Amino acid sequence: MNCEKVDEQLQSLGLELPEAPKPSGHYLGSVRSGQFLFISGVTCKWNGELPYKGQVGTDLSIEEGYEAAKITTLNHLAIIKEVVGCFRLVDRIVKVTGYVNCGQGFAEVPGVINGSSELLMQVFGENGKHARCAVGVSALPGNAAVETDLLVALK
């Protein structure tokens, strides 16, 4: 898939890419090894601001959590573009791991992480379908609502 096609797809969805986030600690934001790009966990910051803070299901609705998950994925797409230069090198999305800041007993974690999964499928089609793990946690950095990490296969 070429860069223009991804940009057009995002535009048709009313979305744009943020600035690629930088690591907030002593780690790499991504590592390319062979045909794989491992992207570290990113929260739902949008150009450095955190629009969705708190626990989903308590402080935030499931719909707000879903939107937060979409932002994490837009951040991942910005990182991919920064690291490999263009989306034409993306073969497929391999795996998403999603973490949802939520209270004990919150059972809608998969529905929140669908915000990430559905966006990847809208952008990359069949090659956006992926393996996934969705986990509820009691806290995330900066009190973010959602964090995801991503594994991408490159051509």
Image: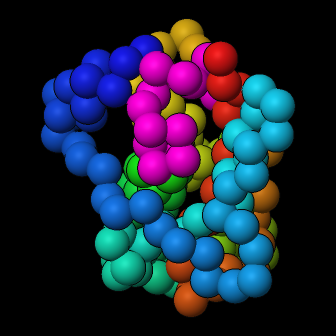
Quarter-of-image position of residue 23? bottom right
Residue 50 in picture, x, y percent from top left? 40, 80
68 and 16: which is toward the camera: 16
58 and 101: which is toward the camera: 101
Q: Quadrant of the C terminus?
A: top right
Q: Is residue 150 above or below residue 101?
A: above
User: What residue is drawn where x is 65% and y is 64%?
Assistant: 29
**One can see residue 92 in this view:** no
Magenta includes 138?
no
Quarter-of-image position of residue 26? bottom right
User: What residue is drawn where x is 76% and y is 74%?
Assistant: 27
Residue 32 in picture, x, y percent from top left? 74, 43
Tell me how many marks there are.
0
Quarter-of-image position of residue 106? bottom right
User: What residue is drawn where x is 82% and y is 40%?
Assistant: 33
Give the magenta part as a residue range.
80-95
Residue 71 in picture, x, y percent from top left? 41, 57
Q: Quadrant of the N terminus?
A: top left
